[in-house]
């Protein structure tokens, strides 16, 4: 398994991977997804051979704050360390950046706690309509 940044030629295959794995509501059309990625500072793509098995993206100022927006691993490849590798690739090693995320999916809290995240009492959100 290889984890690396996404390449421009992989944008549509990644969008299709996300749609096939329950994230169609978050990626939009090919054009919208391209814009989404152009506004993303960090990406991680997990490949098994030529097959996409996972994807993550983060938004950060590179200095103080980061938002881990998306971590998706195909069901057949879960519980193999791929999600952890994706998160480590996106968040990097800078201890000065505080990373936040939404952990609403089943099992997400436990997964992210293993990676050093903790539930915060200071986060707020304005939900989209």
Image (spheres, grey):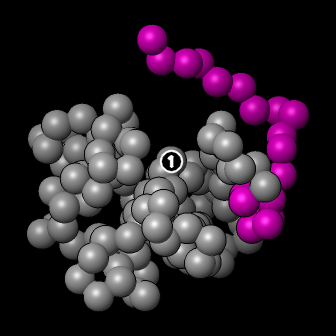
Question: Is 93 situated left or right of 127 in this image?
Answer: right
> Looking at the image, which residue is at 38% across and 70% down?
53
Q: Secondary structure at mark 1?
A: strand
Query: Which residue range is magenta in the image?
Result: 111-129
At which x and y percent is residue 18?
33, 51
> Looking at the image, which residue is at 83% across and 40% down?
120
Along the viewing direction, whichever of 14 and 36 lies nearer the viewer: 14
> Looking at the image, which residue is at 48% across and 17% down?
128
Question: Is 32 situated left or right of 20 in this image?
Answer: left
Q: Is residue 38 visible?
A: no
Q: Is residue 57 above or below residue 87?
A: above
Q: Quadrant of residue 104?
A: top right
- Circle 1 sits on which residue? 69
Check disc 1: other Cα within 10 Å, few if <14, some if 14-19, many if 20+.
Answer: some
In the rendered image, the quadrant that contains the N terminus is bottom left
- Examine the structure image and report whether residue 120 is included in the region drawn in magenta: yes
Along the viewing direction, whichever of 106 and 120 lies nearer the viewer: 106
Q: Is residue 53 above or below residue 127?
A: below
Q: Main secondary structure of the magenta part?
A: loop
Along the viewing direction, whichever of 114 and 77 lies nearer the viewer: 77
Q: Is residue 60 above or below residue 81?
A: above
At which x and y percent is residue 20?
30, 49
Q: Is residue 40 visible?
A: yes
């Amino acid at each position: 398994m290889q984890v690396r940044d996404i390449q421009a030629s992989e944008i549509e295959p990644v969008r299709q991977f996300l749609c096939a794995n329950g994230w169609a509501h978050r990626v939009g059309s090919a054009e919208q997804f391209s814009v989404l990625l152009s506004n993303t500072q960090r990406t991680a793509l997990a490949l098994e051979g030529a097959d996409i098995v996972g994807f993550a993206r983060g938004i950060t100022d590179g200095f103080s704050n980061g938002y881990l927006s998306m971590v998706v691993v195909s069901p057949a490849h879960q519980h193999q360390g791929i999600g952890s590798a994706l998160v480590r690739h996106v968040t990097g090693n800078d201890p000065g950046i505080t990373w936040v995320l939404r952990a609403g999916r089943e099992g997400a809290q436990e997964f992210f706690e293993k990676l050093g995240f903790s539930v915060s009492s200071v986060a707020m959100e304005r939900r989209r309509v």
